[in-house]
Amino acid sequence: MPPTALKMMRQVDRPRDRFDYKMRSIGSGGETLGAELLDWGRETFGLTINEFYGQTECNLVVGNCGACMPVRPGFMGRAVPGHDVGVVDDDGTPLPIGAVGNIAVRRPDPVMFLRYWDNPQATEDKFAGDWLLTGDTGSLDDQGYFRYVGRSDDVITTSGYRVGPGEIEDCLMKHPAVALAAAVGIPDPLRTEVVKAFIVLRSGYQESDALIEEIQSFVKVRLAAHEYPRQIAFVESLPMTTTGKIMRRELRQQTVS
């Protein structure tokens, strides 16, 4: 299930008291999961939600498995055995541990596509040497865990920092008034971009300037100063794909239209 669907389920009050269910495992993919949903999954289902990563061109190459390794909040897991996954620059050169770059998969790989149909140029553009560039950015730690930062065009450049929307959204979700949240970068003459958050409120909360300040302060004390949303818009819903991914591009377009 995509994290957005889990976030919608999270709004159900006292599910363990109301429903008779016993889950054996839950997998999630399509967006970063975040510590808040991991904690909610353990409390609600009595298990650790496993995060999976891949794309249509090269599916399920990174993942967590709570049954056989520690699941670390903020990390989407390790390379699935049999796949060579790394973090490289635009030329396909592997980057140092901890550096943010392109999440990439080395060919040949048993789950990798052969080519785009009738589009050799798009196929060529997808690769840097033998590395398939996923279009996502992330980093790799010294234990082989991948941290997902975001789609290349979703990464926010503010005050000289590159910020992934997932970390901000995860923090926003911890506020009791927030049901769903999306963070995007909007142009700013001083900081290049600033963070703008689009928030769907939980039932019982009303939008107000006081609530905006409260949410901003909530994020300020939990994340770095450049990561808090300098602008907040309350919305009835967020634009999503059919698979439950937030369409941040549409939200960015709303800010400039």
Image (cartoon, grey):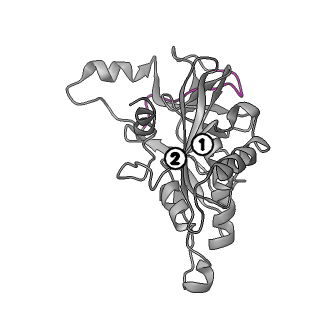
Residue 105 covered by magenta stretch: yes
Image position, residue 139 (x, y; %): 64, 31
Camera-nearest residue between 141 and 8: 8
Camera-nearest residue between 239 and 144: 239
Q: Which numbered disc covers residue 230?
A: none
Disc 1 on helix, strand or loop? helix
Image position, residue 92 (x, y; %): 52, 18
The stretch of residues the image draws in magenta is: 95-109
Q: How many numbered markers are drawn? A: 2
Q: Are marks 1 and 2 in contact (CB under 8 Å)?
A: yes
Q: Earlier in the sequence, mark 1 or mark 2?
A: 2
Image position, residue 69 (x, y; %): 70, 54
Residue 137 covered by magenta stretch: no
Residue under circle 1? 166
- Which residue sits furthest front? 209
Disc 1 versus disc 2: distance between alpha carbons? 8 Å
Residue under circle 2? 31
Residue 123 picture quarter: top left
Camera-nearest residue between 188 and 123: 188
